[in-house]
Every structure is written in structure tokens, then in C-alpha cells.
Amino acid sequence: MDSWLIAMMLGGSMFLGGLALIAFLWAVKSGQFDDEEKFLNAVKFDGEDELNDAANQEAKKEKLKREYRPE
């Protein structure tokens, strides 16, 4: 391979990587990844059975913590 081809490929990849980094930083700054209502929406669309299962699992975790807590 010629060195000019490697230089072009390296330059192109650096340019595209820079564009991707700029796009990612812009998305983070503008709040594209903020999902403040994630848990609220999860509760809205869960059925009663799923909520009861989640409550039972939390109760089991708490029970295990109390049983195996070193004193």
C-alpha cells in the first residue's frame, strides 16, 4: 500500500471520529439522554401482577439482608 493511501484513510477516520465525538457531546449537552420519566412511565404501564411481584422481590431482599447481616 502506498503511504498516501494510509494517510488518507487515517485522516478520514480521524475526521469521522471527530464528527462522532462532537455529535455525542452535543447530544449529552442538549439532554438527549436524560429520561426523567423512565420510572414513572414504567409504573404507569405495569400491571398489578408485575407490581406485586416487584414488591415481593423487594421484601425478600430485605429479609435476606436482615438474616445475613453480621452483628
Image (cartoon, grey):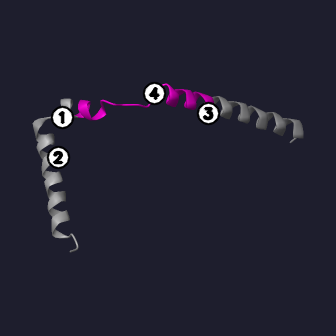
> Which segment is the magenta one?
22-42
The mark nearer the N terminus, 3 or 2, is 3
| Magenta highlight: main SS | helix
- Circle 2: is it few (<14), some (14-19), or many (20+) Cα within 10 Å? few
Task: Nearest to the eye among marks 3 and 4: give it.
Answer: 4
Task: Nearest to the eye among marks 1 and 4: give it.
Answer: 4
Which residue lies under the disc numbered 2?
54
Query: At 88% from the left edge and 36% from the top edge, which residue is drawn?
Result: 4
From the viewer's side, name the closer residue of 8 and 46.
46
The mark nearer the N terminus, 1 or 4, is 4
Which residue lies under the disc numbered 1?
46
Q: Is residue 27 above or below residue 68?
A: above
Q: Quadrant of the N terminus?
A: top right
Which residue lies under the disc numbered 4?
31
Which residue lies under the disc numbered 3?
21
Image x and y of residue 25, in percent:
56, 31
